[in-house]
Amino acid sequence: GENVEQHPSTLSVQEGDSAVIKCTYSDSASNYFPWYKQELGKRPQLIIDIRSNVGEKKDQRIAVTLNKTAKHFSLHITETQPEDSAVYFCAASIGSGYSTLTFGKGTMLLVSP
Amino acid sequence: DTAVSQTPKYLVTQMGNDKSIKCEQNLGHDTMYWYKQDSKKFLKIMFSYNNKELIINETVPNRFSPKSPDKAHLNLHINSLELGDSAVYFCASSPVPNTEAFFGQGTRLTVV
């Protein structure tokens, strides 16, 4: 099955800095790559996603890049703010009829004022 | 207005008991899931249910059984609870497989 590796496990930045979280996946058939943000005690919520026919996607301060050849994708957050502090999960899904999301182990992002 | 709702939010029970967690979605989605999040925050798929077909993660003990009375509900029943079952269980749904999953608020299960 699919295996998703995520790095780093923790990331501390100063407010206004950029943050980058990287993930690799094992199954070349994966074609859907979402990123979820989970605040303490809350549910995971989608912040951005990308499909394999696109190399980059941006939404305000958040961007995701995908390298299909290398089988890795990254989340970029610019101008970080304290409210960006949370656990971020990458995931990958194979484009078959009954595929499910396989999650990375999460990155705890701490943005200090 | 809650899209995916789970009950209860907290569940404390003794080893050996049987318990159920209910999940309902009002989004009209065809696919529902159960995820387990352990103390290290790792999210692991347990079951997915799509169009009356159940896909089971082979690592899930058979003490866990999902039950879907209709497309909007996917309940989780757990027999003979063990200490290691303590975790947060998330229900989720998506319009079809391989699309955004919408999560419920989670059920924190504590087995004592």
Image: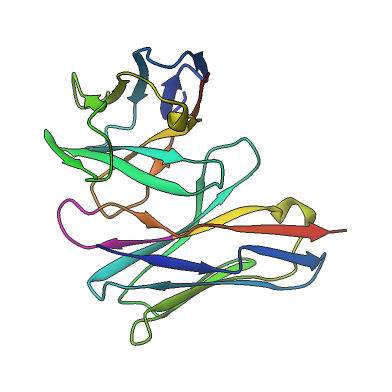
Which quadrant of the view contains residue B69?
Answer: top left
**Res B51 seen here:** no
**Res A24 seen here:** yes
- For the residue pair B103 and B55, the one nearer the viewer reads as B55
Q: Which residue: 65% across, 67% down?
A: A61
Which quadrant of the view contains residue A69?
Answer: bottom left
Q: Which residue: 16% across, 59% down?
A: A96
Is B12 above or below relative to B105? Answer: above
Q: Which residue: 63% across, 44% down?
A: A39
Is B27 displayed left or right of A75 in the figure?
A: left
Is A94 displayed left or right of A73 in the figure?
A: left
List the single residue furthest toward the left. B52
List the single residue furthest toward the right. A113
Is A18 above or below relative to A97? Answer: below
Residue B17 position in % (x across, y down):
38, 12
Give the residues in magenta. Answer: A91-99
Q: Which residue: 68% across, 59% down?
A: A109
- For the residue pair A80 and B80, the one nearer the viewer reads as B80
Which quadrant of the view contains residue B71?
Answer: top left
Residue B20 position in % (x across, y down):
35, 16
Residue A71 position in % (x across, y down):
37, 80
List the single residue furthest toward the bottom. A69
* Colouring mode (rainbow / by chain / secondary structure / one colour): rainbow
**A59 is within the stretch colored magenta:** no
Residue A82 position in % (x across, y down):
79, 54
Number of numbered discs overlaid on the protein picture: 0
